[in-house]
Image: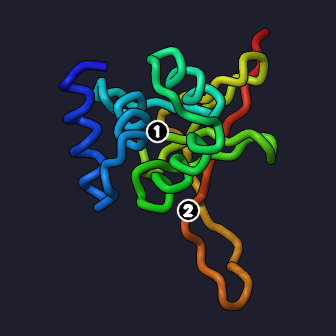
Amino acid sequence: MGPDARSVAAAWLARSGLRPTRQRLALAALLVGDGRDRHVTAEGLFAAARAAGNAVSLATVYNTLRTFCEAGLLAEITVDGARSYFDTRTGDHPHFYWEDTAELIDAPAEGIEIARLPAPPAGGEVTRVDVVIRLRRR
């Protein structure tokens, strides 16, 4: 990981006021260090961290991803009720999910129209709507 990736990661963490610990910096550099948006699973980020020579546990990766979500740096997208992806692009946008490869990618927002939503239960409010379009290869 180059010095540019670390400075991008440090600035990303600073946006939310998170303390730039060694582990947070290492994981943030893998997530946003090259400036590209990505969708990762905890297991995928754990493997990338280990391959980069970072001594980090899978539990630490999960905890750090949750902290990043709580700070507004990542959005969690749940597919199949059990598999979570963490998206560096936090604004509202739809996703394509390839069922055969379990890959989540951004989908174009043009053409998606949500005319109305049901009223939330008493005491609740809608915070976001996740649109995941499942794909299968022909």
* Disc 1: which residue: 110
Whole-angstrom CA distance, mark 2 to mark 1, is 18 Å
Q: Position of residue 120 (x, y in %)?
A: 69, 79
Q: How many C-alpha atoms fall within 10 Å of the one at disc 1: few (<14), some, or many (≥20)? A: few
Q: Quadrant of residue 123?
A: bottom right
The residue at the far front in this view is 55
Find residue 120 and name its label.
none
Residue at position x 54%, y 21% from top?
50
Residue at position x 40%, y 31% from top?
37
Q: Is residue 4 above or below residue 120?
A: above
Per the image, label 2 sits on a secondary structure element best described as: loop
Q: Nearer the viewer, residue 73 or 91?
A: 73
Q: Quadrant of the C terminus?
A: top right
Q: Quadrant of the N terminus?
A: top left
Find residue 128 and name its label.
2
- Which amino acid type corresponds to the residue marked 2 in the rendered image? Arg
Left or right, 59 with respect to 48, comes to: right
- Which amino acid type corresponds to the residue marked 1 in the rendered image? Glu
Q: Quadrant of residue 40?
A: top right
Q: Are marks 2 and 1 in contact (CB under 8 Å)?
A: no
Q: Is residue 117 above or below residue 32?
A: below
Mark nearer the N terminus (2 vs 1): 1
Q: Position of residue 51 (x, y in %)?
A: 51, 15
